[in-house]
Amino acid sequence: MADNPLVSIVVPARNAQLTLARALDCLLGQDIADWEAIVVNDGSSDGTAEIIAGHVGRDARFRTLNSSAHSAAGARNKGISSARGRWLMFLDADDWVDASFLTKMLTALEAEPGSVAAYCGSRRVMPDGELTPPSIAPEVAIQPFETFARRCAIRTHALLIDRATVVELGGFDVSLRTCEDWDLWQRVARLGNRWVMVDKPLAFYRASPNSLTRNSTQMLADAEIVIARGFSADPRVKRPASAHANGANSADGRAASEALAWFALWNAASDCGNGGGPIHPHILRALPARYEWAPEIAKVVFDGLMVGSLSTPQQLAARWDRFGGPLTDLVDQLSYIWSDPVAGRRVQYHLEQMLLDFDDLAAPRRLARTLGIRVDARNPTSTKLPEGIDQIYAYLMVDSQIAALVQFGALGTVTKRHWIELILDVMPPQELTRDLSGFKRMAFRLWKGAARVASRSPVPTLQRGAGADKTNVLTAQTLLRMAGRRSDRDSHYGRLAQLTTAAQRLARPNTEAAEPSAPPRPAQVEGRRDGDRASFWDHFFMTADPWNYGSPYEQEKYERQLEILPAGPIGRALELACAEGHFTRQLAPRVGHLTATDISAVAIARARARCRDQLNVEFRVLDLSADTLPGEMDLIVCSEVLYYLDDLDALRRFATKLVHALAPGGSFISAHAFVLGDNMERTGFDWDNKFGAQVISQTLAATEGLVLERSIQTELYRIDRFRRLSPEELAAEPTVDHVSILAPVEIEVARNVVWGGARARRSYVARNERRQRIPVLMYHSVCDDGPAALTRYRFTPAAFDSQMAWLRANGFHAIVSEQLGWFIANRHPFVGRPVLITFDDGFQNFADHAWPTLRANDFTAEVFLVTDLVGENALWDADSGPPTPLMDARTVGRLAAEGAFFGSHLATHRAIDGLSSSELAAELLRSRMFIERWTGRPTTAFAAPFSVTDRRLGRLAKECGYRIGFGARSGPADLDCDLIDLPRIEMRGDRSLDDFVAMLEAVLE
């Protein structure tokens, strides 16, 4: 044996004759030989000494010491005092390690010079020999001291640790009956040295009914001491790292009291597994109750249950009767401590799902809220719910093999027919019909066919302010009528029908009405009009004042056209495209005789009526493209119409015709807007016309006989005065005036403008780009100020404006969830650059700040409302500061009429994983019906509050009339997505515009 072995292994043994040989034999099987084992016989009265003597006689690397400490800590310290190795390992007499343990741990230490310890994963071994899944704590390698200040994250024998450091720190604290290893690891970590992780389960820990870990009273008392030491200075550590000198960081509520609460929870769960024990509500009160902690709480309870019941995960559900009562009492106690039954129920659901996820359901498992069963997928039978059960976890069986898993909220008896619907929804029919008789195959095909009826439809369009389609029967209503015919009141569908009736009663309209708003105006008319042009324009003018000619913006443009009129008397004037005569009425007093023309007889009739007191005006129908213009005109005026000529050749022909219609010296005034098609680098309208003001002006200026005399130019349009030159007349330099637009630009104009130019036009990308995925953006709040804790959820109006401007300048167009659903359902590639913009919660600042910006950039958005709190405040954020006001129903109705869309954020903004199935269904129904009442549209989309979902949500949502849902998944939406569980990308107010751009460009790629 070497005098200075690399590793010294200390093995305390007290009355360990049943397990010690296995522990020592695992050392003999190690891949390397450079070790010594010091076996400390701690006052054994059984055959332990003989086993030790046998190994010492067989291999000189074993040495033995005697101790009367009667504690693992004292026996280990005895061994440490005799150890000679560079590294220490502590192996209890009932544990063992893998044959590669020393090799892998030493290799890791060699790769990280200066590390104080290496640790590995471990597995528990139950009394029946079954193994639990591997466990390891990656956080130890990241923050060793912060971890050990709060919990013991490593098994005693799952590490190699520097002997000199252990000796310097005084070894194990013999005053602790338990947790002594945790206490030592905490002191070592306080020094600030690295810990190396070996991500392999190399250590095996034997769970025993006699283990000290099952003494919860002692464990809790010792843990309280160790945790208190971790959150304060420890005089036993003479050279602590400066960051740890005064203890662990208590920021973000991660204080000693919370660490002790987590330990007490594990202890209480272990006691439950062992038949019950004391619960310490004053300690558990420090546990975090928020929804995001429920999975972690369930994991800790699950782990404690395994130790207390001496069970592997696969055995727990079958042993529910042993610990289900105490465990339910523990969860009820948590609900009481938190004053929140939803929080307790959330833990219960998470825990029961974990239990059943490990179980094969060889027999039915009735837990507190969940029934786990097997169902013959080819011949299901009705399932009556036991009292208290509102969730079913079922394996669908085919030929005695598990074919699929379904987990769903159940409100009542699940009938055979209901089972068939569920089965057909998740299993391929060929798997069900294989080896069946012809009659049964036909029955299944009929069911499958019925489920697909109306699954494909034309792509939905955005309906701005459209009323609800009374002929459209929502999915839920159809199901509920079917349920009424086929189910009794105690069935799932029967009870869903009762909840629907209750929701309809609540949402029944009263005297409240949405604020009336003006009907939407037609969109800008773009591009070529095939067929009969006159009929097209007659149809267009069926809506009076389609361009809002009386707006300040249009009136200012008229004033500037009058300003640019030539000096002196004007005899004969011709107005082309006079529309309804708004400018005609202002021009008539300035000329001797005015001929006002338009291609639309409908428009001419309105113009004649408007100008009936103007005796110097005559009206006629004229197509400026096809018809001959009247001649010898002193003035011709043409405003906002030359865009609609078929092409540039048609514009040139018109220009030539114009010259012939003007008298020598006569003037032509043209008023037209800048469009992106002419110049992408400047502000312009994103119309799909062939040309705009720039090309029109250039073409007219290039026409023989015409010369530009004066031009008034704004950022959005230019007004030019051309003159027909007299023979032998020379052209002078034109006068150009650049002026600002003083009038407010109305929304129907502004939404077509891309300020500062564009990098891509919508029409171009729509013709040339197809993609498989799109961004679905999730916003919350748009305002300047608010609680610091909510900064990530809040955008300043300026920051939001810049993002929407970037989207507009890069050719994005907005779609809504129904359109997204159509593309996915039909597996149709997305056209152009669609973006779905969503807002959660329905804050009033959406109406005040976000909606005006969206409209100005020609976007819509889908807002998910918390319907029970509409018109009130976001009470769920009250812990972070003053809650933000929410939109009221009248505002929702007004915005819907203006083109905003609304979906459900459920009724109360509670995370759904803590709602009972009945509460969840009631919220889904009530929320949908109120939104439909306020908006006058069908509501088919929801977003889960806090982005929290569970396996019940999707099916219940469909049964309540929803087709589209947004849950917890993050990222772009693609054609393979599940419509009821779509992903979104959270938009964070603490990120820059560059981050926003990088994210969207990554989606486009």
Image (cartoon, grey):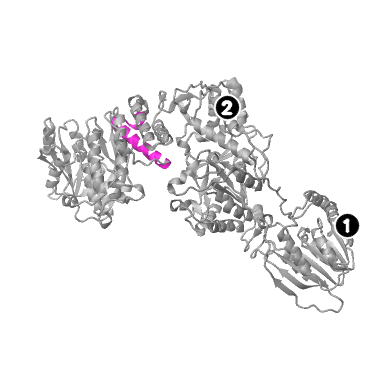
Percent x, y of residue 510: 63, 36
In the picture, which quadrant includes the C terminus? bottom right
Tell me which amino acid carries mark 1. Answer: Arg
Q: Residue 700, relative to residue 620: is it above or below? A: below
Q: Residues within 10 Å of mark 1 (few under 14, many from 20)?
A: some
Horizontal side of residue 482 vs 190, given as left or right: right
Question: What secondary structure is found at the residue carrying circle 1?
Answer: strand
Q: Residue 667, relative to residue 343: is it above or below? A: below
Q: Is residue 456 visible?
A: yes
Q: Is residue 265 visible?
A: no
Q: Residue 764 in magenta?
A: no
Percent x, y of residue 789: 43, 51
Percent x, y of residue 524: 72, 54
Horizontal side of residue 6 vs 856, given as left or right: left
- In which quadrant of the rendered view does residue 295 lie? top left
Q: Residues within 10 Å of mark 2 (few under 14, many from 20)?
A: many
Horizontal side of residue 923 vs 357, given as left or right: right
Question: What secondary structure is found at the residue carrying circle 2?
Answer: helix
- In which quadrant of the rendered view does residue 557 lie? bottom right
Q: Nearer the viewer, residue 20 or 811?
A: 811
Give the spatial CA distance, label 2 vs label 1: 64 Å
Tell me which amino acid carries mark 2. Answer: Ala
Percent x, y of residue 205: 25, 36
Q: Main secondary structure of the magenta part?
A: helix
**Residue visible at 51% across and 51% down in the picture:** 987
Q: Which mark is residue 620?
A: 1
Q: Which residue is mark 2?
A: 497
Span highlighted in magenta in the image: 291-316
